[in-house]
Amino acid sequence: MTTLSEKVQHAIQSLNLDQPKIQVHGAPNSVFATVVSSSFSGVDEAERQRRVWEALRQSLDEHERVAVEFVFTIAPDDPEEAAAGDG
C-alpha cells in the first residue's frame, strides 16, 4: 500500500525538476512538503505553486489533495535560503 507521503513525493518527482530535494512531513492524513530545486530559480512563487499543485491534481484524488496542507517551493538561491545558510 502506498502512503500519502509516497504519493506526494512521486507526484512532485513527475515534474522532472533539476536535482530536487523533496521532504514530506506529517501524519498519514495531513502532510506538508518542502521542495528545493534550482528549477525554481527565477520563477515567482505563484508559478512554482501552480506547477506543483497541477502535478498533485493529476496524481492524487480529491481526498488526498485535501490532506496536503502546504507545499513549500524553494530555490537554493532564494534570499531566505541564503540567509539561513549564514547561521
Image: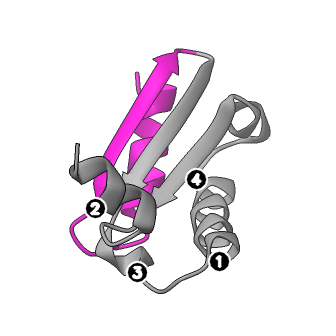
Instruction: Tell me where residue 71 appears, x and y as whole percent.
Output: 57, 47
Q: Circle 1 is placed at which residue position? A: 47
Residue 37 left/right relative to 65: left
Name which of mark 3 and mark 2 comes first in the sequence: 2
Front-most of residues 5 and 83 = 83
Name which of mark 2 and mark 4 comes first in the sequence: 2
Residue 23 is a magenta residue: yes
Q: Circles 2 and 1: CB distance less than 8 Å?
A: no
The three-letter code of the residue at mark 1 reads Glu
Q: Circles 1 and 4: CB distance less than 8 Å?
A: no
Residue 55 left/right relative to 42: right
Question: Quarter of the image containing the N terminus?
Answer: top left
2 or 4: mark nearer the eye: 2
67 above or below 28? below
Q: Give the residues drawn in magenta, as a range.
A: 1-28
Q: Circle 4 is placed at which residue position? A: 59
Q: Circle 2 is placed at which residue position? A: 20
Residue drawn at point x = 33 percent, y = 72 percent: 77
Q: Please tell me how crowded label 2 is: few (under 14), some (14-19), or many (20+) other residues with Cα within 10 Å.
A: some
Name which of mark 3 and mark 4 comes first in the sequence: 3
Name of the residue lying farthest toward the top: 27
Residue drawn at point x = 78 percent, y = 40 percent: 62
Q: Circle 3 is placed at which residue position? A: 41
Name which of mark 1 and mark 3 comes first in the sequence: 3
